Amino acid sequence: MRAIVTGGAGFIGSHLVDALVARGDEVTVFDDFSTGRRERLNEGARLVEGDVRDAAAVKEAFGPGVEVCFHLAAQADVRVSVERPDFDLEVNVLGTVRVLEAAGHQGAQVVLASTGGAIYGECERPAAEDAPRRPIAPYGAAKLAAEEYLATYNRLQDGRHVSLRYGNVYGPRQDPHGEAGVVAIFFGRLARGEQLRIFGDGHQTRDYVFVDDVVAATLAAPGRSGVFNVGTGIETSVRELAEACGRVAGVEIDLDFEPPRPGEIQRSVLDPTLAERELGFRAQTSLQGGLASTWEFIREAEGERRDGAN
């Protein structure tokens, strides 16, 4: 099929582009490289450089014949959303509207990369798609608003757009120095021989899902409609994660505890039952296996970074 991936030079987006190209799809990458990396670009994909808030740039990226847009371009840092909620709103809501408008002109389907933890807020149990939605940070509110725009355009244009609520995605290519998730940050610090820093008491839990599994779920979404959780259904505390990272890296960990950060939830875990039933998706990668792959990537990247600095 002909597909466009917004944020296609980013962490998850570049993995998705690789998978699409590998199966023979015609792929356009749309990215402004604010967080994406040029070295991640797949040579088999067409590149259109631009900002997702720019209607003309988004329209140019679509071009004729696009069947599906995987919309991964986003402001994905909870801390930034707290400090700059207007910027978060522009990228995550206005940017989604720009994509929906361009898709409508082409009759294309939109698959939105959304978020589970930030939308559901505090979870008493694994959250299903119909669980109460109680975001406690602007990031979650903006992503929820973006989902509602998809649902509205489905009703307005008789569309079949899909929202995928990802868990805490981790894996190779996640940048330990940028808007990284905690796995990349922990491994980056271990590779540099630094102390691991935990905000809060370390008992807060997340549903950590490996990037290859996220790509598999995303590829299963075109042709469907609705909202689906993409996670493992397993919660792991930050302290447990730190210990697991230490075991994979083969080092003794040293923990430094800092005050909790605003906008961060204590318990987050997703119920993936609907995705398994409707998309045929079940996460295949164990936490141990995913951490091992991630550690190899970050250890090599940090080594190259040191060599380049010398």
Image: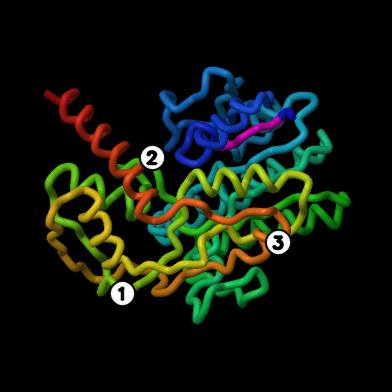
Q: Which residue is mark 1?
A: 203
User: What is the spatial separation of the Cα atoms under label 2 and label 3, in whole angstroms?
Assistant: 28 Å
Q: Which residues are magenta?
A: 3-7
Q: Which residue is mark 2?
A: 172
**Which mark is first along the chain, 3 or 2?**
2
Seen at 65% across and 47% down, the residue is: 96
Q: Position of residue 105 (x, y in %)?
A: 82, 36
Q: Nearer the viewer, mark 2 or mark 3?
A: 3
Amino acid found under the numbered disc labelled 2: Pro
User: What is the spatial separation of the Cα atoms under label 2 and label 1, in whole angstroms?
Assistant: 25 Å
Q: Residue furthest top?
A: 43
Seen at 76% across and 58% down, the residue is: 151
Image position of 38 (left or right of 28): left
Seen at 53% across and 38% down, the residue is: 13
**Which mark is first along the chain, 1 or 3?**
1
Residue 196 versus residue 90 in the image, above or below: below
Amino acid found under the numbered disc labelled 3: Arg
Q: Is residue 4 magenta?
A: yes
Label 3, residues with CA under 10 Å away: few <14, some 14-19, many ≥20: few
Q: Is residue 122 magenta?
A: no
Residue 67 versus residue 257 in the image, above or below: above
Q: Secondary structure at mark 1?
A: loop
Q: Position of residue 200 (x, y in %)?
A: 27, 72
Q: Position of residue 108 (x, y in %)?
A: 79, 38
Q: Quadrant of the C terminus?
A: top left
Main secondary-structure element of the magenta-colored stretch: strand
